[in-house]
Image (spheres, rainbow, N blue to C red):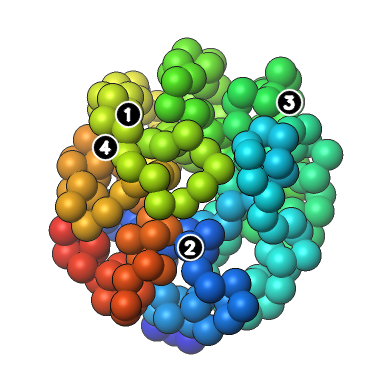
Amino acid sequence: MGEYAHSFWGGDPMTKIAPSVLSADFAILGEEIAKVEPVADLLHLDVMDGHFVPNLTIGPMVVEAIHRRTRVPLDVHLMIQNPERYIGAFAQAGSTYLTVHAEVCPHLHRTIQQIREAGLKAGVALNPSTSLHAVENILDQVDLILLMSVNPGFGGQSFIPFVLKKVEELSRRLQHVSPAPELEVDGGIKLENCRDVAQAGATILVAGSAIFGAGDPRAAVQKMREQVA
Ligand code: DX5
Ligand code: ZN
């Protein structure tokens, strides 16, 4: 511990890197997390329900188990219907950020408030095809906006190019918001394109397969960090 000399802790404007454990080996999850722990700003955890997205992953129990093993802040991305039902459980599990999809929140403003009342940082995610209009009215009330750059559900997909313009557009709008939420981008981020995404205005890059699919996940984070520094 005490090794976390990264942007999250230092408060400097460097782009943060959030390894997504979706591409880790779940049979040795603790070891996988230990590989990236000294270099990760956040640990990105993907929760899927088989309804909102065509895949099933982890729930609060696993988030809690991870929380017990690491001091890296947990960035929990809920790809589930009715996320408001689970805010308490994910708060208790030790989440730092809790992000819900706008597409499944008819009362998004209320849901954001509930997340903050539970003591968490509130995030809102948008699928690639969802307009930025969906978050226009709540930009000053969230801690993070997550722009999906693949259709959510699986790791290892290709970055959808038009999302880059969306990142630029949102980044421009956030210049007028104070305090500005984090602008996180998730899906298809590799060593080759991470610099473009950061230059478009992303403040947090999520990467799963590019990190845990690499022979040395820690070195993969460090290489990515060099690209976006
Ligand atoms: C996809 C998840 C992502 C996923 C990204 O639905 O939300 O967090 O882990 O994986 P890569 O980086 O492999 O595209
Ligand atoms: Zn994710």
- Where's residue 63, x and y in %? 68, 64
Disc with the residue nearer the chain's start (3 vs 1): 3
Cα–Cα span, label 1 and label 2? 22 Å
Amino acid type, label 1: Val
- The quarter of the picture where residue 202 lies is top left
Across and down, in percent, residue 11 comes to 36, 58
Label 4 or label 2, whichever lies nearer to me, is: 2
Q: Are marks 3 and 1 in contact (CB under 8 Å)?
A: no
Label 1: few (<14), some (14–19) or many (≥20) C-alpha neighbours in 10 Å:
some
User: Residue 77, percent across and down?
Assistant: 59, 47
Q: Secondary structure at mark 4?
A: loop
Front: mark 3 or 2: 2
Give the left or right position of residue 216, taking residue 1 as reference.
Answer: left
Q: In the rendered structure, which amino acid carries the disc numbered 2?
A: Ser
Q: Is residue 54 left or right of residue 159?
A: right
- Residue at 75%, 59% (x, y): give it: 60
Q: CA distance from mark 3 to mark 1?
A: 27 Å
52, 132: nearer the viewer:
52
Mark 3 vs mark 4, CA separation in Å: 27 Å
Label 2 SS: helix
Q: Which residue is mark 1?
A: 163
Q: Which picture quadrant has residue 90?
A: bottom right
Residue at the spot of label 4: 201
Judge whether residue 112 can be spotted in this image: yes
Nearer to us in this view, 27 or 94: 27
Residue type, label 3: Arg
Name the residue beneath numbered marker 2. Answer: 23
- Inspect this view and state whether residue 42 appears: no
